[in-house]
């Protein structure tokens, strides 16, 4: 047994103990624990470790003077509460959420907008972002009989990776590793299958730049290309946590909805990829505006600028010429 394997096993042991503790806690206790951990992260840990400045600058960029410094701090604090609550909810999902209680756990918004594409003969690309409880969205689709091929990065720890693999498989989904995923995604769509992925990661120097909160953000053009090639609907879905009402709901209550359906057949011309990418990005932005505290502001969405991408193009042309 190597030192690395020993470390992975130790990490997995800690993770499983945490899962057992969370599963033994009531929903109210999980909320208390999330708020306690969020207080520790926000008030005690060094801010460099928690990406406080990244989150603060992102919120300032997105909302441009709408919030005071105190309100921004509150959003960041509530973001951490949301993330810790999401971890607790994931550990409870397989036991607390099933088809028999789905309508007491979920409220629906624009339900038919996503059901129609999923019941059509065309493939579907289900998009979400680091918003709300995206694992709840996936589980809901599986519970209602819509298996999805989920695109996600393989975890470095193989034991943790296998746990999440089994967790998603429990509701009928299959996994596609993010590295080299294009071929697998194309194969699934060609056979009429459906895929799901997050659409709000920085795509680097070769991404398509579209407006996200009125600032250019590098976004993967792969989604639009696949949608065009295989005539796949793009559905921007989400599961947003609603205010707690433990008197009437035994568990957490979510709003599950479809913000927008993008039909690639409606887009023509050389800028079709740009238009499609902009449309689903705007849909995600609208969602975030409704509950900004349920978005992961600590990741660097605007990491790559158009100026950097243009400079990189000039360097590549220079080397090629």
Image (cartoon, rainbow, N blue to C red):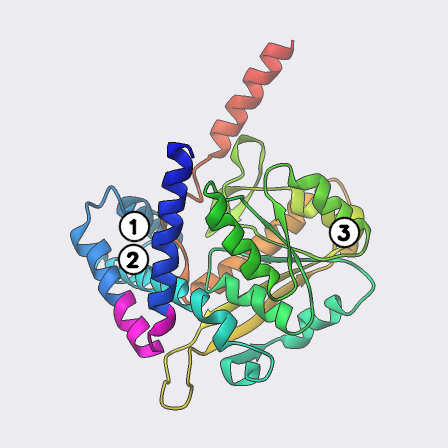
* Dot placed on the residue nearer the N-terminal end, 1 or 3: 1
Check whether the beta carbons of the residues at disc 2 and disc 1 lie within 8 A of each other.
Answer: yes
The single residue placed furthest to the front in the displayed view is: 1
At 23% from the left and 54% from the top, the residue drawn is 41
10 Å crowding of disc 2: few (<14), some (14-19), many (20+):
many
Rendered location of residue 102, percent (x, y): 56, 81
Instruction: Look at the image and give the residue range highlighted in magenta.
Output: 23-34
* Dot placed on the residue nearer the N-terminal end, 2 or 1: 1
Above/below status of 85 relative to 9: below
Q: Which mark is residue 56?
A: 1
Q: Nearer the viewer, residue 65 or 321?
A: 321
Is residue 38 highlighted in magenta? no
Kindly report the distance in space between the C-alpha atoms of the residues bearing marks 2 and 1: 7 Å
Q: Nearer the viewer, residue 148 or 63?
A: 148
Rendered-image quadrant of the C terminus: top right
Rendered location of residue 163, percent (x, y): 50, 55
Which quadrant of the figure has residue 171? bottom right
Q: Nearer the viewer, residue 53 or 29?
A: 29
At mark 2, the secondary structure is helix
Front label number (2 vs 1): 2
Residue 293 visible to the viewer: no
At mark 3, the secondary structure is helix
At mark 1, the secondary structure is helix
Residue designated by label 2: 76
Residue designated by label 3: 189
Is residue 29 highlighted in magenta? yes
Q: Main secondary structure of the magenta part?
A: helix
Above/below status of 289 relative to 95: above
Which quadrant of the figure has residue 280? bottom right
């Amino acid at each position: 047994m190597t030192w690395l394997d020993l470390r992975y096993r130790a990490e997995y042991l800690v993770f499983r103990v945490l899962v057992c503790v969370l599963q033994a806690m009531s929903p109210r206790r999980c909320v208390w624990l999330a708020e306690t951990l969020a207080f520790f992260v926000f008030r005690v840990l060094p801010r460099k470790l928690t990406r406080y400045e990244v989150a603060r600058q992102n919120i300032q960029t997105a909302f441009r003077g709408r919030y005071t410094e105190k309100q921004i701090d509150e959003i960041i604090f509530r973001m951490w509460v949301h993330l810790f609550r999401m971890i607790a909810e994931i550990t409870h999902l397989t036991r607390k959420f099933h088809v028999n209680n789905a309508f007491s756990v979920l409220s629906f918004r624009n339900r038919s907008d996503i059901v129609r594409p999923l019941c059509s003969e065309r493939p579907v690309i289900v998009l979400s972002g680091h918003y709300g409880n995206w694992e709840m969205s996936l589980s809901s689709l599986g519970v209602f009989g819509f298996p999805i091929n989920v695109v996600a990065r393989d975890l470095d720890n193989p034991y943790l990776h296998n746990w999440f693999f089994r967790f998603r498989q429990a509701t009928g989904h299959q996994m596609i590793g993010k590295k080299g995923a294009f071929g697998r995604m194309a194969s699934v769509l060609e056979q009429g299958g459906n895929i799901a992925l997050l659409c709000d990661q920085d795509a680097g120097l070769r991404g398509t730049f579209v407006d996200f909160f009125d600032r250019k953000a590098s976004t993967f053009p792969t989604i639009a290309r696949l949608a065009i090639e295989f005539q796949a609907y793009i559905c921007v879905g989400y599961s947003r946590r609603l205010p707690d009402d433990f008197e009437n709901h035994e568990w957490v209550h979510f709003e599950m909805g479809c913000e927008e359906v993008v039909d690639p057949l409606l887009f023509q011309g050389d800028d079709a990829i740009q238009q499609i990418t902009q449309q689903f990005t705007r849909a995600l932005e609208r969602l975030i505006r409704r509950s900004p505290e349920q978005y992961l502001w600590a990741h660097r969405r605007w990491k790559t600028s158009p100026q950097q991408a243009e400079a990189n193009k000039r360097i590549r042309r220079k080397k090629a010429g």
